[in-house]
Amino acid sequence: MPKIEVNERFFFDLAGKTWTDKESFEQDLTVAKAELDEWNTTLPADGERTIKIELNDTNRPDLWSTAGLARQLRIYRTGKIPSYPFFASRKKHVKAPYRVVVDASVREVRPWLAGFVARGKAISDALLRDMIQTQEKLAWNFGRKRKSVSIGIYRVGLIEWPVHYRGVDPDSVSFVPLQDTRKMTLNQILEQHPKGIEYASILMGKPIHPLLTDAAGRVLSYPPIINSADLGAVQVGDTDIFIEVTGSDYPSVALSCAIMACDFADMGFDIENVEVNYEYDTPFGSSVTCPYYFQEEVSVSLADAGRLLGVPLEISATLKALNRMGLCAYSTDGALIHVAPPEYRNDFLHAFDIVEDIMIGMGMETFAPQRPTDFTIGRLTPIERFSRRAKSIMVGLGYQEMVYNYLGSGKDYAEKMRISPKELVKIANPMTENYEYVRNSPLPGLMQTESVSAKASYPHRTFEVGKVALKAPETNYGIVTRQYIGFLTSHAQADYNEIASHVAALMYFLGKDYSVREAFDPRFVPGRQVEVVVKGAKIGVFGEVHPAVLEAFGIVMPCAAGELDLDMLLDD
Amino acid sequence: MIDQSAARALHPLEVKIILTFDAGALIDSARVRETLGFKEGQDQQAFSWLVAKGVLEEADRQTEVFYELTPLGQEWHDKGTPARRIFSLLREAGPLSLPDIAQKLGLDQKTVGSAFGALSKEGVCAVDASRCAVIVRPELPQSVVDTEALLGAASMQGGSLPEGALSPQQKALMAQIAKKRGAQDAPFRIAERARVLFRLTPRVVEYREAVVALGMTGEELGAITPEMLEKGTWKQGSFRPYNLQIPPARVIPGRRNAYVEFLDSVKDKLVSLGFEEFDGNLVETEFWNSDALFMPQFHSARDIHDVYYIEEPTHAKFIEEPYLSQVVAAHEHGGDTGSRGWQYQFDRDFTRRLILRSQGTVLSARQLPKAKVPGKYFGIVRCFRYDRVDATHLSDFYQTEGIVLGENVNLRTLLGFLEMFAVEVAGAKEVKYVPGYFPFTEPSIEVHIKHPVLGWFELGGSGIFRPEVTRSLGVDVPVLAWGIGIDRMALMALGLNDLRELFSADLESVRMRRSQYKIQ
């Protein structure tokens, strides 16, 4: 979930309200599903305080900026929906003073581009930082780490229009990228420049790479990697800037462009349009004027919404609630509500998505909790009930119940237990080798206890009931999960006879007949270990733990132990 | 003045001494054994207790030397000294070489050598021309006879001879055969014991008054024995009161694990609220873990670094139909769920990818096709997260999740359930609901509670499953989905502040752990 930092004064100005106490600020933030992460009570010397805010809705990238979040709070309070007349749409043509030409060559690598020009105001330090943050959040969180969205910002005055977006051979073009002084080819940037290395995977193996140049052929940027140091650097004090978005997914590109344009408009900039001419077709024709309103109207029936919310809804109150959320909503028949999503939102996949906006618009206090009336019978799973019987018998036998993690190292789970790691389910992308395997037995956990508990008074008698993962190639997943009980006794006289007596008591009180036959498990001493057999099937093993296992765990007290498959025992 | 409880706590041995001897009297072990019939050890116990109470004080202390029979001395006594055994053997079997003697007697050569040396020196034995030992004077030396007399006397007196009881000749002999250290190859060990003389102090009078007032005799009964019960002898006596303030000895019982018991209590609570438990596989597919929950395959929470992938096998063989087709349709264009879908090309290979279950909601999704209406289901199941392990993050941990299906469930009934959990499970006094976000629910609600100890915190997340989720899995009624975080409550109940401690391998801390948790 994205976290943003906002300049307090900047934010309060845009929201049109100054908050002084934390509680009411937090309460107001809930309408945007935002949480206050950090808000220092002391004011720094320069008076510029920063607030850290976490945004929970991953489908609302419009909230991940100072202006966007402030907008939602402002509309909720005032009910005034801002207008953004500069948007073009299917129905509305807008004349664009700037033009970008998209060459057919870029279609296979990164086909979509949108952009606009913001002018009329100098960029302050706070604004520059905010702009960079918005750019990063959109590209990283919403744009899947620049894969589907990346954003470039330039000074308009340096560019000779029209701008060209085309695909090039990555060895054929070179320019000086930001944060460097050398002239590099695209391939050199991917290999040597920090940003190139970070995002190389997006373009890896592609014969043609995207490039943005001006009419004079000078490089603006190499999307989605890096801007040029010449034309692609924006500083405090700059006034006219060009913002472009490229990506692999058209709605994401168009929405990111819309969000930035609305933000700049809210911050007092004039927005001027950019016409994008494609040499191929887009869902909106071959020429698209940006920012472009591409969203479609959605509708929900008042009755359905009321059923889902558990209250009868009244049409005017419902429309008012939607209005507080910034949605232009109307109804012609009083039964069906139509919503035109705001320019900066595209999160209405289903009619029910409107219902949540009604809920927030009305306020949570509108909905009183209601006790459920449906009668249902509660019950535990059969294996849980059976496991609890086994546990109470083990406790009666003097055993302490333990509970362990299910992930561990190959060293603990295989090497020390003298089994092959091939028997274990291995994680392909472990974070560390300490958590690389899923256990196939509770015994390594019980051994671990012995290895760290030599000072605890003896005898030690421990058990655990829990899941293990076993390889089972014939099954759909190739791996099955089982409920096992593992048990261990450790003291100077711990031996086969003791553990055999305890297994006998356990099985007697579980009401299970069993027989034993000699086992050949490397974890136990040869000749002092058996398989537990119920109706011809092996359901477990017990015996004296092999001294080589004890030695590997650093244990100097004899141990006898065993494990049983409770699922198999229950089913028998 | 001695109060009654102090007097009542006296041991019968103490009582007997208090009743028998007067202030100023001198007593020692020998005297109390003789007078009161104390057994060995009882006198020392009584003396140390009475010294602590100030009834006795040390009057004199002398060190006395004892000669204790060693295991070797006991063997000499039982089988005869080596000299006697060599002498007897030669007399019966005639001349023999020393190695033969050693072999026949089962003694080592060194022992035979030194015993034979002593016999030769006394002129009892000699070596003949064939280098065999022979008897030259048919009479054992006096030293051997005297040694045997000492062994016999020591054995008679419990294995120990006081130095004072020996004649000068015996003392001289003892000096040759007894050792103070390294006495394993000598028949006697020299031991020094202190003989202490105690004087009764005037406090004995105070104690005696109290003892007499209570009618104590020192003949009170101690432990109740089967014999006492069989013969009925307890009827003749009174029971000695025990000191009831002594801390009892520790016992280590077999016990349930405090954390698992806590989880069980939550399970029991949910069952009592009408929920049926579900369970499932640790290893799941991307399909059930996320796709079936309408999380788009390009969602940022589905990156390689958010779930653990299985190395082998990598993919399930198949995904159950018709759910696969229906979920694919919901993702790509909404299918017949009323949604426009996520508008992308669904990856049918990726959906079979095997992973470790990362959220309990998987089991809710799996339950939907077979769920009853109305129905309530829950699970407390182990989930796996790609997190660096520390005090607040674990790589595997328990999640508590559930669903409610019903024709008439809605946002208000969802809030009703959340309130019920907050009050019944978490013991909350105040509850508040705020809009939340989960990819699979709409609307989504977070529930925050004011806990009596922990203050305000987020108890859980919830919502109504999106139609894209329910319809694709064959359910046409609204489904409430909820998850509650109970680990913070578990830590508090167990007095811990580190999540790793919940799964501790340390036996002593697990043995001592107890739950302070009171479920409603």
Image (cartoon, rainbow, N blue to C red):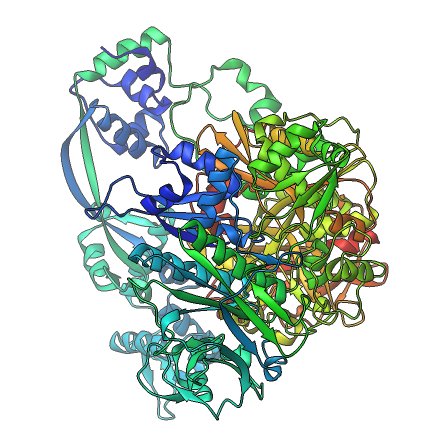
Report the side of B458 relative to A183 (left or right). right
Which quadrant would residue A453 be assigned to in this image? bottom left
Relative to B514, residue B151 above or below: below
* Residue sticking out furthest to the top: B213
Image coords of residue B265 (percent x, y): 62, 35
| Placement of the C terminus of chain A among the 4 image quadrants | bottom right
Total numbered circles: 0
Report the side of B507 relative to B267 (left or right). left
Which quadrant would residue B373 be assigned to in this image? top right
Which quadrant would residue B309 be assigned to in this image? bottom right
Relative to B232, residue B486 above or below: below
**Residue occupying image coordinates x 29% and y 21%:** B17
Image coords of residue A571 (percent x, y): 82, 53
The answer to which of B192 and A7 lies nearer the viewer is A7
Relative to A220, residue B176 above or below: above
Image coords of residue A280 (percent x, y): 66, 77
Q: Is residue A447 visible?
A: no
Q: Is residue A249 visible?
A: yes
The answer to which of B299 and A306 lies nearer the viewer is A306
**Residue occupying image coordinates x 32% and y 74%:** B115
**Residue occupying image coordinates x 77% and y 34%:** A333
Image coords of residue A80 (percent x, y): 51, 37
